[in-house]
């Protein structure tokens, strides 16, 4: 399953539209006024299905991942000098990517690629392509991409 993750151009808070290969809206992400990033994910019918929330007052950025109001995992930035590294406590997944964090893979415990993420350059807003192997993992992959993107925004 391929998802196009596109940031809305004129928005006070982080807002994204996520489309499938046919151009249909699969998810809408709306940033909420909060201390730290708080991104709520809604399905195509307007039901809240997930949330990515930054934990504040931590030494390095940390995000909690929620599905239907239940915390299912977390992702935190690890200290590193050259290549950004993340500690993921979620489904046994890990992130491997390039130094610019524009292209990376999400792999499971067996080392099999769960999702491939690539940033499209020369766009007005942040735009990513997320290729998810199993459509059941689409929401989870989206939450990881949102957390990593929010961490990069906090850094800049």
Image (spheres, rainbow, N blue to C red):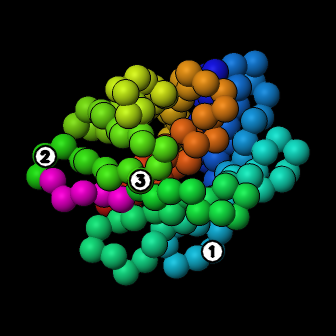
Q: Crowding near pointer 2: few (<14 within 10 Å), some, many (20+)? A: few
x, y percentage for residue 76? 36, 59
Report the residue at 27% width, 38% height from top: 100
Tag 3–tag 2 contact (CB < 8 Å):
no
Looking at the image, tell me whether mark 3 or mark 2 is earlier in sequence order: 2
**Magenta: main secondary structure:** strand
User: Which residues fall within the magenta stretch?
Assistant: 76-80
x, y percentage for residue 12? 62, 64
Residue 20 in sight from this viewpoint: yes
Q: Is residue 136 above or below residue 55?
A: above
Looking at the image, tell me whether mark 1 or mark 3 is earlier in sequence order: 1
Residue at image mark 3 = 89
> Of tags 1 and 2, which is closer to the observer?
2
Q: Quadrant of residue 93?
A: top left
Q: CA distance from mark 1 to mark 2?
A: 32 Å
Residue at image mark 2 = 82
Residue 120 in sight from this viewpoint: no
Residue at image mark 1 = 33
Q: Residue furthest right?
A: 45
Q: From the viewer's perspective, tell me whether residue 9 is left or right of residue 130.
A: right
């Amino acid at each position: 399953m391929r998802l196009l993750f596109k940031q809305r151009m004129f928005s006070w808070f982080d807002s994204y539209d996520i489309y499938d290969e046919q151009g249909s809206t699969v998810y809408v992400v709306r940033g909420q006024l909060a201390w730290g990033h708080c991104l709520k994910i809604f399905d195509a019918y307007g039901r809240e299905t997930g949330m990515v929330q930054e934990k504040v007052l931590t030494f390095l950025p940390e995000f909690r991942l929620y599905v239907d109001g239940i915390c299912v995992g977390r992702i935190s930035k690890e200290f590193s000098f050259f290549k950004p590294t993340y500690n993921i406590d979620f489904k046994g997944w890990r992130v491997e990517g390039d130094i610019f964090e524009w292209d990376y893979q999400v792999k499971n415990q067996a080392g099999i690629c769960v999702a491939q993420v690539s940033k499209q350059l020369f766009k007005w807003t942040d735009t990513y392509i997320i290729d998810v192997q199993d459509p059941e993992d689409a929401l989870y992959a989206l939450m990881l991409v949102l957390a990593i993107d929010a961490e990069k925004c906090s850094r800049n």
